[in-house]
């Protein structure tokens, strides 16, 4: 089985860490899969590479079928969340089904040339695997992140769990006890029951059957598992496309229309070629739109260059660096004292009253940051100063760190801004709702992703567009399944890792879940807090009460001064 996982890929030595969960005898003697992406490797012809991937994947599936008729744990997705889950659940010998040929998820498949992390490096690291250069103040590039993740997989021997080129296309519930009362828990309203009937995550019998399509094969193979961890990601895969009345959509436009997801597939040369000398419109004003506009302006420098116009509907606050009026940014939201000002789920009546009294303080913090941003950046000059408070962007994880040189390009008239609450296509470009026409040869839709249409996410998105997950992980009405990577924070890696550690405790029987009713109440309350904190609550972000959230999962710092004034980062959650 392990050899099958490695079939068709080069043998490499694996550093086996003295980890408590890994079986060294099985890892040290087995070849591990290569971390070279076979698709981009240029050692052989593309045809032979593709056939070797197909052969390897098919053999891998056959072996999986034989060896794993019923296993304990399946993990769907090999991004950050899937890797963290594999590491923390290694004692259950999980299978990680990854649709593509590599680990890293969005960092591999959903990035531009210039995409960098916007979380500071030391905040985006696994608690047991520090960055080699964690003191380096630059934000890591996407390539550095993939490298870091591959190093993590090396360090903890995770390659052997991963079945690459294995796309999960079907998930069927097998569990149930045959009587309706006992089966309560799966999409029923019998909330008083225990989750999964007994409250147990592992029940010693298959609960889910997973259909897997292997790269290069039409056949779908089925495998049974006791527990499934869904780590298929929130972003990427499904582009969000604006809808237009007939005769006003891209069909009338003479130029080219491209979603940012397709732009991610181009190499540097192709992107420059695509944009140089063209009138470009970028629709959107989030981080990916901002990065794209800058790349466009850079490609158009020099003779024959054209300006890029950003079409902005909803404004958001942008931040040049993690320093506000000379103070470190963490002071405002990332210490226990700072988070004391903010509402948190299930906080009780007294605390709710206190929070109400602290409303002016919260507004003051937000205004303080806004005053700096309005002073430092030409937001008024370009008419792009948001009218909503900064904290609403922060509390919905939408704060974008500006790439270097963005407003320099605006000052050189290479990036322009047009506000529009509505727009449509015309033959020669786009027409805004005030009737202005912006000429374009190329329109980029940096309109984000249709998260709710992502595979299996639709399972749990409720009417308001949120995912009601207890501890950001367990849907109270879906038994024997967990979701990791769907709740956001300022460091999604940290949030995913903590949830996986908590999950390991649940699967290891170290604690029990509350009743379904208690979990439903908890998640309802959390959704209410998010709604009250930000109009952008659908993003399911915990950034203003992340320390409290983590407290429910693990506890840390030893002295009260540090508790109050020091920022929390992953090292605080390191296991002794
Ligand atoms: C451009 C960009 C910049 C970002 N910057 C930051 C940042 O600065 N800080 C931060 O904290 N977060 C950032 N994020 C958020 C980022 O999504 C998370 O930090 C994190 O990488 C998400 O990891 P994940 O494993 O949960 O999901 P993903 O990275 O989406 O991984 C999901 C994996 O599941 C696989 N998969 C999906 N469906 C299936 C299936 N049916 N069968 C098998 N496999 C499947 C996919 O191929 C993928 O490998 C950014 C996201 C993007 C897109």
Image (cartoon, rainbow, N blue to C red):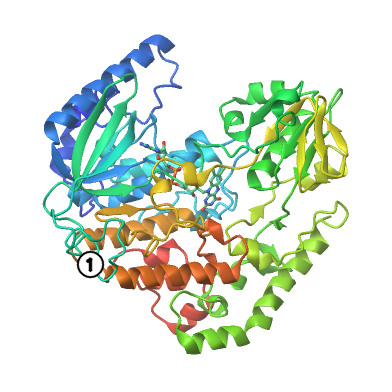
Name the side, left or right, on which 513 lies relative to 565: left
Q: Nearer the viewer, residue 128 or 270?
A: 270
Can you say whether 507 is above or below 510 in the image? Answer: above
Viewer-side residue, 540 vs 134: 540
Is residue 567 visible in the rendered image? The answer is no
Q: Position of residue 52 (x, y in %)?
A: 31, 16
**Percent of width and height locating residue 30:** 18, 32
Q: Quick one: label 1, few (<14), some, or many (20+) residues within 10 Å?
A: many
Q: Residue at x 69, y 27 (%)?
A: 257
Q: Is residue 317 above or below residue 564?
A: above
**Residue 162, image x and y in percent?**
29, 36
SS at circle 1: loop
Image quarter in which the C terminus is found? bottom left
Q: At 61% from the left edge and 66% from the top edge, which residue is drawn?
A: 534
Q: Quadrant of residue 480?
A: bottom left
**Residue drawn at x 31%, y 20% as measured from the top left:** 218
Q: Provide the residue designation for mark 1.
A: 194
């Amino acid at each position: 089985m392990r050899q099958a996982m490695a079939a068709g890929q080069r043998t490499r030595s694996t550093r086996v860490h003295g980890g408590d969960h890994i079986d060294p005898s099985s890892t040290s003697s087995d070849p591990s899969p290569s971390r070279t992406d076979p698709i981009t490797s240029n050692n052989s012809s593309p045809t032979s590479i593709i056939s070797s991937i197909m052969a390897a994947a098919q053999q891998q599936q056959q072996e999986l079928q034989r060896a794993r008729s019923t296993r304990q744990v399946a993990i769907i997705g090999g991004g950050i969340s899937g890797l963290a889950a594999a590491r923390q659940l290694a004692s259950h010998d999980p299978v990680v089904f990854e649709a593509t040929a590599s680990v890293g998820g969005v960092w591999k498949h959903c990035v531009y040339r210039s995409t960098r992390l916007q979380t500071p490096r030391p905040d985006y690291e696994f608690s047991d695997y520090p960055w080699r250069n964690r003191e380096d103040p630059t934000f890591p590039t996407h390539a550095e992140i993939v490298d870091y993740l591959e190093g993590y997989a090396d360090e903890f021997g995770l390659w052997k769990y991963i079945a690459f080129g294995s796309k999960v296309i079907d998930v069927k519930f097998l569990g149930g006890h045959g009587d309706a009362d006992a089966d309560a828990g799966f999409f029923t309203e019998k909330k008083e029951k225990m989750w999964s009937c007994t409250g147990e995550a592992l029940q010693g019998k298959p609960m889910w059957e997973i259909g897997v399509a292997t790269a290069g094969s039409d056949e779908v193979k089925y495998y049974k598992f006791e527990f499934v961890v869904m780590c298929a990601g929130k972003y990427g895969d499904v582009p969000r496309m604006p809808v237009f009345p007939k005769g006003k959509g891209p069909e009338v436009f003479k130029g080219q229309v491209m979603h940012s997801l397709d732009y991610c597939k181009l190499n540097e040369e192709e992107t420059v070629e695509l944009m140089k000398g063209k009138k470009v419109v970028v629709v959107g004003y989030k981080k990916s739109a901002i990065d794209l506009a800058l790349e466009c302006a850079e490609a158009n420098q020099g003779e024959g260059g054209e300006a890029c116009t950003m079409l902005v509907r909803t404004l958001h606050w942008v931040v040049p660096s993690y320093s506000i009026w000379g103070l470190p940014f963490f002071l405002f939201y990332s210490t226990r004292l700072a988070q004391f000002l903010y509402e948190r789920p299930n906080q009780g009546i007294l605390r709710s009253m206190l929070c109400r009294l602290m409303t002016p303080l919260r507004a003051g913090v937000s205004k303080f940051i806004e005053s700096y941003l309005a002073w430092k950046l030409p937001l008024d000059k370009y008419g792009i100063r948001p009218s909503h408070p900064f904290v609403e962007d922060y509390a919905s994880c939408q704060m974008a760190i500006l790439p270097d040189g963005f407003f320099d390009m605006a000052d050189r008239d290479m990036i322009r801004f047009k506000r529009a609450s509505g727009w449509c296509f015309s033959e020669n470009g786009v027409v805004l709702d005030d009737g202005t026409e912006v000429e374009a040869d190329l329109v980029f839709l940096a309109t984000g992703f249709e998260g709710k249409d992502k595979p299996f996410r639709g399972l749990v998105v409720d009417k308001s567009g949120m995912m009601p997950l207890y501890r950001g992980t367990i849907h109270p009405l879906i038994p024997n399944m967990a979701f990791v990577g769907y709740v956001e924070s300022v460091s999604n890696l940290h949030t995913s890792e903590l949830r996986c550690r908590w999950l390991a405790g649940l699967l290891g029987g170290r604690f029990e879940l509350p009743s379904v009713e208690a979990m439903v109440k908890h998640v309802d309350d959390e959704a209410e807090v998010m709604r009250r904190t930000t109009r952008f609550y659908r993003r399911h972000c915990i950034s203003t009460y992340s320390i409290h959230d983590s407290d429910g999962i693990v506890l840390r710092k030893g002295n009260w001064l540090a508790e109050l004034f020091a920022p929390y980062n992953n090292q605080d959650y390191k296991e002794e």
